[in-house]
Amino acid sequence: MTVDAYDSDGSGGAFIEEPPRRADRGPDGGRIWRWFTSLLDAKALTLILIVIVVGYLAITPLAYLLYGTFIDDGGFSLDSFRRAYEFSGIWAMVFNSLIYAVGSALLAFVIGTSLAYVAIRTNVRFKSLLVATALVPLIIPGLLYAIAWIMLSSERIGFINQISTVIIDRPIFNIYSLGGMIWVEGTHIAPLVFLFMAAAFRNMDPSLEESALVCGASRWTMLRRVTIPLVRPAFTGAILLVAVKAIEGFEIPALIGLPTRIYVFTSRIYFEVQNFDFGAAGALSVNLMLISIIGVFGLAKLRGNARDYATVTGKGFRPQTIDLGRAKGPIAAVVLFWFILTAVLPFLVMVYTSFLPYYQKFSFAAFGKFSWANYADLFDNRIFLQSVKNSLILSFGSATVIMVIVGIAAWLVVRGRMRGRGIVDQLTFLPMVVPGLVMGVALSFVYLRNPLPWQIYGTIWILMIAYSTRFMPYGMRYAVPSLTQISPELEESAHVAGATWWQINRRILIPLMIPGLLAGWIYIVITSIRELSSSLLLYSPSNEVLAILIWIYNDKGELTTVSAIGVLLVLTLIVIVTIAYKLGGRIGLQTD
Amino acid sequence: MLVIENLVKVFEGEKARRFRQKSGDEKPSSAKEIRAVDDVSFEVKEGEMFTLLGPSGCGKTTTLRSIAGLERPDSGEIRVGERVLFSMGKGRKIHMPTNQRQLGMVFQSYAIWPHMKVFHNVAFPLQVMPRNTRSSKEVIREKVMGILETMELTEMATRQATKLSGGQQQRLALARALVIEPQLILLDEPLSNLDAKLRESLRFELKRFQRELGITSVYVTHDQIEALALSSRIAVMRDGKIMQIGRPREIYEKPANQFVAEFIGTSNFVEGIVSGREGELLVVDTAAGRLRATIEATVPVGASVILAVRPEGIALSTGTPTGTEPNEWSGQVITRSFLGDSVVHIIRVGEQELRVRAPSTLSIPEKTAVTLRIDPANLSVIPG
């Protein structure tokens, strides 16, 4: 029996001079025997191990979540749903969630689409600024963005309200409201729409628009009858995408909504967990997940249909740009204003606060009290240093674990011929439908009952498992294309040249996949270093990560410390994102 | 040298569907499985360039991949010299893994590893040999530089493999296939991704290397001109079966059936019934008149046959038949088109339209009455 055969048509392992099948093995004896011995083969062992790991990561949280929610005292029960929905504000919560998701999706859509159209199809000034603002969500995590906006626009001491009080003698902006939440969420996810729509506008064949003009249509008619119908699938996709993001988002509803008891699904789940009603938290989680599943499947379906619009998804064109004429100046001003509002101001307010001895209104007198004390204190703070270490271990560790797993899983899905490989593909994408907070709830269900022989709960490993599960789909998104773009002939020629499966992997496949895997690795590092929503339910003292530390200090009202940590985190992320861009820039946008 | 006996490969399910799509078969009612290679047998002699020729989906690539071990056939036998690479349904069960077959292969895309230098691409087959047979580093170096010199790539050894021109890439792919001195090399449409000009010059280069080094090769192509120009012998395939095996001239001049005649260039076909023999000429009555064809085989009187003649096998002149030559027909020019090196005329003879290729100096206006003369040696007789 030959091991490590690279069997491209997958009809089983190679065999040489196999003895004739013995009658007592039955008609299928030979086949079963061959299957059994192929298990001893190193390649098969690797693949089976990966299937088990992926299956374990993807399925256990959901299974325990459903079990913990529906099974009470050993029997099926809907009691947890009753408890979850009993409280009097339930309809307000559902209504708020709806308004919040739709509102921030629409806000993000209007801003993102207009900026994308302006950036791609017109000769606007400051185009590079627009592209830079698209990176803001990667660099300023939602947690910090929300805190920065609280500092900018809380009713009494917010900087923006200070200005408005001077001008019109009253505050114009109350951040602690549903409107405030929508504003912060909407502007934070608008860049997602920007990137989505920019791709759609860039890929649209300009001759379709030109022929409308030649036919005698005015620019407005062209926009209405040709451009908009052509990008309509992208419209729906973008709105759905950001609506799902908004309803899954935790940081902003928690930071802005909780203090004034404006609940949405995610913040209500957190509230239930804090009251130790895990059943009710599970029930709400199951509901939230259902909404998210509908959204994700809608998106997948839409992406399928969108293929019919060949002009939108086809090859790139060089679109002809529209001359803005007299509008050029005002539109450039709007672009500049947008950049200052969503990138410069939030960062500056953090920098300003980080130098203050205690948090106070903006004043020029405060500059006199500036010192490095907050930063110096951080480096004397054992918990801070420990959490930096934890964050680095967790983000580097989970990125490495994920890329190894998805590298092999991608091979299995793209190149393997194993039956049921489609299921592996589905499994790696399954965590996509689980919002971060729900993943936290589900994993605490799992490891409070612990199916593994080692202690997981209360250690750093539970966070490692959480990150590895949550970000596995993102890793897969990088690994699959990096493999599909390698022609199978490169492997086949190595095989004909005499290389075994391991030699092909080591010398051909892995070196060629490395750029794609590295891009995915960096993306996961960037995403996991600021992870909050799962960590919050799973961390234990001495296992804090940076995001948790920010959360804790914010809770205590120590905004100067929060700002110092925030500035350091943002600067670190700027460095990593810049490196990623220098390395080839195949990096996407935060989808967290 | 290479012997293939009764090779069969059946595709099922998804693979069958993809294969069918490739061969342009759109019948949705077709069976779930497809016989991509259907009882194929042939033998390639030492030093030969043997070509598998046919339209896409005819099974030629599947046959080649079966020799390499990249596909596993369902039954039949493949032997190279004394070594049995595959055997199934002939009293023994053997399927040697691809990496132990010690063959050379040149792929359609050349499959040059982009992350390696030229030298390392060529050294790879030597470096991955099992440890007990692997040569030392110095011997590997010597062998690689030797084959690079043969392929005129010595200066390129330290270049990144992706920085080579089309011609150099082909030589690199050949060098890599030949470095282990295989008994047999397999070439899978190596010229099909190139533009027409480069293709022609590389075709000559390929032929020169093959003849000079005397390498036994199996070549797969769908391009009949390439096959005619390169091969020692050709097997024309269709729907998984071999339609004819022969030397290029035989295939071109004496196609065994209508498919081969049509596939190798454009032919005119005239149906008729054998009415007798005049010495070495077979007499055939057709709707447009009597034709005489040179053929050695005996065909019974009364048998229905198809006569094939190539457009350049018909001589064209203005005026009326002289009545002295064997195959003379009168007809009328329907249309003509100038192709640079020749002028193609469509001539109506009775109910039949014939395509006639005339030298570019001869261009006859439409509706002119003309005389066609067909040399009996230019007519092939295909059983009807």
Image (cartoon, rainbow, N blue to C red):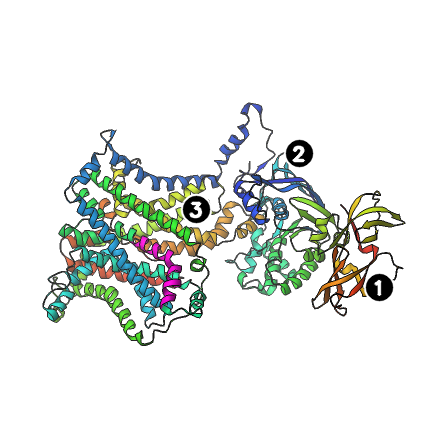
Q: Secondary structure at mark 2?
A: loop
Whether tag 3 and tag 1 are in contact, CB under 8 A, the answer is no
Q: Residue furthest toward the bottom?
A: A326
Give the CA separation, mark 3 to mark 1.
Answer: 77 Å
Q: Nearer the viewer, residue A585 or A464?
A: A585
Placement of the C terminus of chain B among the 4 image quadrants: top right
Q: Nearer the viewer, residue B25 or A44?
A: B25
> What chain does mark 1 sit on?
B
Please name the residue that numbered disc 1 is placed on: B320
Q: Residues within 10 Å of mark 3 (few under 14, many from 20)?
A: some
Dot 1 or dot 2, earlier in sequence = 2
Is A453 on the left or on the right of B248, as rendered?
Answer: left
- Magenta: main secondary structure equals helix
Q: Position of residue B269 (x, y in %)?
A: 75, 52
Give the CA separation, mark 1 to mark 2.
Answer: 64 Å
Please name the residue that numbered disc 3 is placed on: A408
Q: Quadrant of residue A422?
A: top left
Q: Secondary structure at mark 1?
A: loop
Residue A402 within the magenta-colored segment of the rendering = no
Whether tag 3 and tag 2 are in contact, CB under 8 A, the answer is no
Q: Amino acid at mark 3?
A: Ile
Please name the residue that numbered disc 2 is placed on: B90
> What chain does mark 2 sit on?
B
Residue range in magenta is: A220-242
Residue, x 23% and y 64% (percent of image)? A347
Residue A234 within the magenta-colored segment of the rendering = yes
Is A19 on the left or on the right of B232, as rendered?
Answer: left
The dot on residue A395 is none
Q: Position of residue B161 (x, y in %)?
A: 54, 61
Same subunit: marks 3 and 2? no
